[in-house]
Amino acid sequence: MFYDYAKVNVKAGDGGNGIVAFRREKYVPMGGPAGGDGGNGGSIILKADEGLRTLIDFRYHTHYKAERGAHGQGSNQHGRSADDKILLVPVGTVVRDAESEQILADLTTAGQTVTVAKGGKGGRGNTHFVSATHRAPTLAENGDKGEERWITLELKLLADVGLVGFPNVGKSTLIAHVSAAKPKIADYHFTTITPNLGVVKIDEGKSFVMADIPGLIEGAAEGAGLGHRFLRHTERTRVLVHVLDISGSEGRDPLADFHTVNNELAKYNHFLLERPMIIAANKVDLTLKENENLKRLKESLPEYEIFPISAATGEGLRPLIYRLNEILDTIPLEAAAPAEDTALKVTKVEEKPKFYLKRDDDGAFVVYGPEIDRHWNRTQFDNDDAVTRFLQIMEAMGVVSELRKAGAKDGNTVRINEIEFDFVD
């Protein structure tokens, strides 16, 4: 089954903890510190795989977690770093942060990778805290927490030619006739609800990929029906074929349909109308020889090449396919690159404060922020020396001076996460 969208949670592994240890060898008097560092946690990495065509694996498995790093050991033995967890996705997958909707990566080539959650760094053992005045430190660090986030995966098919048009105009019949694709075909609207890919062979060693995009309707650019889900697959195609029902078998006006669908393409992304487009005037087998609709199309749209065809009988398909091949030979592969609205944009990251300070209703001063949490997570609070070092870091960051400015007096409560301290000026 074809799935082109998924939302998943990724959690990188935490770093292993450093350890407090000392050398205790028989012939080494006054052995120094020998606590090893913790290993790094595994990261979550997405890798584009040309053998995949759908995101179905992420439909039924939405949480992915990498292993944490091993803890350090005595005798300066460092913990093993965990292996990265590599998740395979189809080529053409756009990765976004689910909360901010920022594009993290656009995986358009096989083998391309992106790290979506970075593993935590291992904590340092007590060998790192030796100083001239402190020869036997009894403190070590916890490993950093691995990153965790929700991400969305959107698959945009990579195809040379995309078939667009209203429902039931014959797109599926066309691709079934010219390729080995086997889409569902029936005489009712929205028979095709997922895109179909087919390889069209021209001559020996010569072929191109055609995509049957499910039928568009008016309002698709605003999301009517499954508009956005369908329209995204047009972005990677190098040539668009606009399939029209020239017979007017359902009382439709093919010229009006042409303008309606093109208007939806332009509203979704004006870049699409800059792509080469030709018209396949389908169902000529159901029309009279002198077809008024075909005549009107040629008079009203002289700038477009129009090919009268019958997808059902195969009439006119050979000239259409060969003309598409000629057009593709003149278009570089780079033309299938992401459209403007999905291009990665580099924005200047504003420098954030190292910490924030507020006062709770009970009068306690609360210190918080990502930098505070980072040092908090590294500190082993069951160790007095580690707690002392944590407070020294807080002072070095300017927490004490900011508390003074905020009016903190001796004896006031200062709260950092789950621990409370008495302020002493």
Image: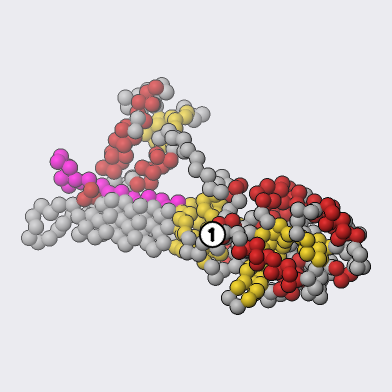
Q: How many marks?
A: 1
In the image, what residue occupies the spot 54% across and 59% down? 108
* Above or below, 199 relative to 327: below
In the image, what residue occupies the spot 76% across and 49% down? 263
From the viewer's perspective, tell me whether residue 375 is left or right of residue 172: left
What is the x, y in percent for residue 8?
56, 57
What is the x, y in percent for residue 255?
84, 54
From the viewer's perspective, tell me whether residue 249 is left or right of residue 416: right
Quarter of the image containing the C terminus?
A: top left
* Above or below, 71 relative to 179: above
Q: Is residue 376 visible in this depiction of the protein? A: yes
What's drawn in magenta, residue-wise?
129-147
User: What's the amino acid at mark 1?
Assistant: Thr
Of residues 337 and 218, the one nearer the viewer is: 337
Of residues 219 and 117, the one nearer the viewer is: 219
Residue 174 quadrant: bottom right
Q: Is residue 143 magenta?
A: yes
What is the x, y in percent for residue 383?
29, 46
For disc 1, the marked residue is: 108
In the image, what residue occupies the spot 80% across and 73% down? 315
What is the x, y in percent for residue 193?
73, 64
The colour scheme is secondary structure
In the image, what residue occupies the spot 65% across and 74% down? 202
Q: Name the main secondary structure of what is drawn in magenta.
A: loop
Q: Is residue 215 magenta?
A: no
In the rendered image, the residue lying farthest to the bottom is 204
Q: Secondary structure at mark 1?
A: loop
Q: Is residue 260 visible in this depiction of the protein? A: no
Quarter of the image containing the N terminus?
A: bottom right
Residue 242 quadrant: bottom right
Q: Residues within 10 Å of mark 1 (few under 14, many from 20)?
A: many
